[in-house]
Amino acid sequence: MKKIISVLFALALVGCIAAFAQKKENREAWRERIRSERVAMITSELELTEAEAQAFWPVYNEVQAQRREAFKASAEALKVLKDGAEGKDAAALLDQYEAAIQKNNAIELQAMNRYRKVLPAEKVARLLVAEEKFRHQQIGKLGKGQGSPRSEGSPGRRTGGKPVPVED
């Protein structure tokens, strides 16, 4: 009897590990799909020449990496602030959050200047519009129950939710 329980427990454990690995794969596939869609939209909207593309994409990819890191830092600072903003620590926690926000803003301003070094101002403006358009498009998909790693292939997917209003 103990052997049967041990075998069943081992099978359940393997199943849980496999499910977790599959969720992680789905999440990574989803992120890659989003990146590909963003690149396609930007490429289409900017109509880059070959020389512009060679100069632009390394800068853009580096800025995206900086944005991701800054977003993580501000999200972590907000979580800490939410979890413990009581007493005398509140001022220090607010300072940490403010620093994270300032870093986000600095990255955005630096990005604009870096883009202007490799692209004409008109294309930098089109890039900003394309990124905003892409963001709204993704929010619209999420509002319709599409596009998240949780909704892809999930048997219990909700599809009857109200779409999130998106202003253009």
Image (cartoon, rainbow, N blue to C red):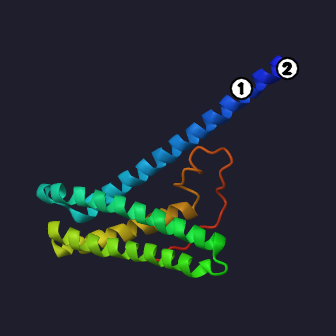
User: Which residue corresponds to the image point at 81% horizontal and 17% vertical from the top-left?
Assistant: 3
Label 1 to label 2: alpha-carbon separation: 14 Å
Looking at the image, which is closer to me, 16 or 52? 16
Place of residue 8 in the rendered image (x, y in percent of width and height, measured from the top left): 77, 25
Mark 1 or mark 2, which is nearer to you? 2
95 relative position to 2: left or right: left
Give the position of the N terminus as an image quadrant.
top right
Residue 150 seen in this snapshot: yes
Looking at the image, which is closer to me, 11 or 90? 90
Place of residue 6 in the rendered image (x, y in percent of width and height, measured from the top left): 78, 23
27 relative position to 132: left or right: right
Q: Residues within 10 Å of mark 1 (few under 14, many from 20)?
A: few
Q: Specify the amino acid type for callout 1.
A: Leu
Where is mark 1, residue-wise?
A: 11
Q: Specify the amino acid type for callout 2.
A: Lys
Q: Residues within 10 Å of mark 2 (few under 14, many from 20)?
A: few
Residue 2's disc is 2
User: Which residue corresponds to the image point at 30% horizontal and 76% vertical from the top-left?
Assistant: 109
Label 1 with label 2: CB-CB less than 8 Å = no
51 relative position to 146: left or right: left
User: Which residue corresponds to the image point at 59% horizontal and 50% vertical from the top-left?
Assistant: 150
At numbered mark 2, what does the secondary structure look like: helix, strand or loop? helix
Give the position of the C terminus as an image quadrant.
bottom left
User: Which mark is first along the chain, 2 or 1?
Assistant: 2
Place of residue 24 in the rendered image (x, y in percent of width and height, measured from the top left): 54, 43
